[in-house]
Image (cartoon, grey):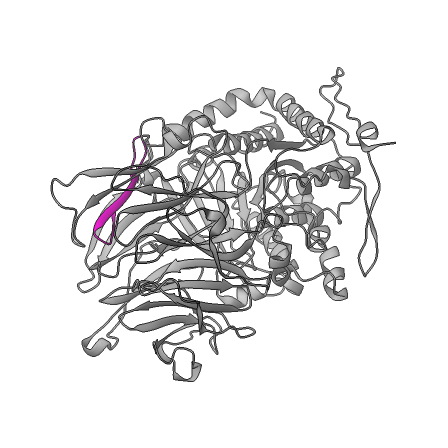
Amino acid sequence: MTIMMCCCLFLACPQGGPVAPVATRVPFTVKSPHGDRVDDYYWLRDDDAKTKRPEILAYLNAENAYTESVTAHLLPLQQSLLAEMRGRIKEDDSTAPLYHNGYWYSTRFNQGAEYPVLVRQAGTPIAPTAGAQVAVLLDGPVLGKDKPFFSLGAIEVSHNNEMLAWTDDTTGRRISTLRFKSLVSGETLPDAIPGVMESIAWALDGKTVFYVKQDPQLLQTGPVYRHTLGTPHESDVQVYNELDETLITGVELSASHEFIMITLEGFDTTELRVISARNPLVAPTIAIARRVGVRSYANHLNGRWVIRTNDHAHNFKLVESDEASVQTVATWRELIGDRAETSLDAFQLFNGAIALGERERANGIVRVVPWGAGEAIVKPFTIQADESAYTMSIASRQDPASPAVRVAYTSMISPTTVYDVDLASQARTVRKVQPVIGYDKSLYRTERVWARSRDGKQIPVSLAWRTDRFVRDGSAPIYQEGYGAYGISSDADFSSNRVSLLDRGFLLATAHVRGGADLGQDWYEDGRLMHKKNSFNDFEDVTDFLVRQKYGAAGQVFATGGSAGGMLMGAIANQAGAKYLGIGLHVPFVDVLTTMLDETIPLTANEWTQWGDPREGAAYKYISEYSPIDQIQRKAYPAMLVTTGLWDSQVQYFEPSKYVARLRAMKSDTNPLLFRINMDAGHGGNSGRFNRLKEIALEFAFFIDLAQRSLGK
């Protein structure tokens, strides 16, 4: 019997209401060196980048129809939430202009537009020139018109300010095309290069561009190519090809504009190769060689390299080197040493200072290190904050000639404030406060608390609530989110959308679980590879802490996470599902073992350093013990909402599809299990600033309804 015949679907509507789709089981053996497993829903996989088999589309459409039917009663609430969230957005908004190489750049949104317009105005590092024309560089609404999905990626202006290069994605699969526009004539050039990554660097001649091709199957970075404007891209020259598939290749222009930097980055090693930006036809040379276990990130300005490295520095240190001796690690000179309580996450080079992005006690902070006479470091200063849970960040790619560093500040109740901090005087100038229509910050509070883990660690938790709608008496609903992977910290940042939950009495909680670098590199290392289960235990322990301390009700806890955070949700559903009234799993990485065994799936080889390589026995056993789809049990599960995008290239649609099919066949409860598939999007969901609100409104409505029903409302 063929798959087409046997994979029938059932969608009935008896008196009791809609019945969920049932995907027929078609046993498939997933082989490995450490044992075979049977996957009954492997047939849901189709690697075709343009379409999917009819029986798969039929199943996914049936799931969407079921979700729509089950949530039909939520439509008024969803529409109300959508109106609230959209109503807080200033529709004709713009970003604060940022100076770069003779121009001030900003993006603006026209009334009702889904996509931004990129503009610039001539000026000096101090201010735009009075009366200078504001020129449109890219018109997002025009470029994205009538496209189901549209996203701008990399955007780079040539050093002579006459050419623009950008990438755009019209599928949601992060398969981009590189395009060019003359900023003199306004014409878009015919030089369109398909299948590229979002990484571009101009040579100083204004006609030579370096870019990274995309592996057509794995969708990860491929070789670096050199393109000359006006020539066929088929004749482009391959400049470098990295054979190690665990490394990610990128290109960028150094701060000094002296070098094209080819960066090779993995989770355990890095390498830097450079090409003279003045002589782009020469072959790249190694500036900083790869070493096992050492990660070094460099930039160049004023004749020297400045390097953030973990070489004998667990939380990273900052060093400098002369151009001639950068390859000799022994000659590197320390600028900022390794510190146990502070991790060095990023830096920006200026003629007058170095700006450091650091992290202390789960907060992102910014420090400025001025240069004194003879470029000696003078006393650094830290930009202060007045909340216990917050994050600061440095704007990327700032012009070294700028007299101030651009900083963004936010917390769970503070809309993002962008300001410039003078590198010499420390004076702050507010450039923009995120407008949130109808929002009164004085009605809300935020706090950082610390939950004790089962193995004795202190887990940071960021909280927010509305003072006149929340009482700490153990009665409030809790909306708890988490991520915990790749060393990415979970920032305590503001979302105007989440105000809709705060206004309904929810406590918002961000659990800074291990696997992120919220408390430095040890926090990251203690949540990956053979320590990954700590991420799941931390999230559950935070839930227990919040309930025990009467921040919320035991029967009113909702959990949510996306991507690797979706894996976290899947693991939580298996090990502690009874503690949650509802769980949201968004583009969830839930079929960990099968995916990590298959090198033909995008990103698999890159991920071995995070989860382990299951071709090795110990890693296979450990992953199998937590992989959400493999640990589904015949027991009760909470209400769950699973979302995905059909064209997702990071977590393929078939992972959550198989997960839902297996979970539906195994679980013993009658709680809703809803699956929403965006048929036009990828990993990031809908494109457009308003379209993406629909998926958020669905989750919020789902949770709010569950909370009300549990209380008999």
Residue 360 can be seen, yes or no: no
Point out the image quarter for the C terminus.
Answer: top right
The furthest residue to the right: 1
Residue 687: x, y in percent? 47, 35
Q: Can residue 401 be seen in this view?
A: yes
Identify which residue, 388 or 394, lies in the foreground: 394
- Residue 455 in picture, x, y percent from top left: 62, 65
Which residue is at the front of the view, 293 or 13? 293
Residue reaching furthest to the left: 130
Q: In this view, does 537 lie to the left or right of 34?
A: left
Please tell me in which quadrant of the rendered image residue 386 appears: bottom left
Q: Which residue is drawn at 45% across and 73% down?
A: 288
Quadrant containing the N terminus is: top right
Give above or below for 380 relative to 82: below
Viewed as shown, does residue 120 lie left or right of 70?
left
Coordinates of residue 679 in the picture (x, y in percent): 59, 31
Q: Is residue 636 left or right of residue 120?
A: right
> Does the magenta segment cover residue 105?
yes
Is residue 330 or residue 171 the one in the foreground? 171
Which residue occupies the foreground of this view, 323 or 680?
A: 323
The x and y percentages for residue 162 are 26, 47
Outermost residue toward the top in this view: 15
Count up the numbered dots. 0
Q: Tell me where residue 340 sits by quadrant.
A: bottom left
Magenta-colored span: 92-109
Q: Please check the rendered image and state whether residue 60 is part of the magenta-colored stretch, yes or no.
A: no
Residue shown at the point (26%, 45%) measured from the top left = 105
- Residue 27 falls left or right of residue 496: right
Picture layout, residue 495 above or below residue 438: below
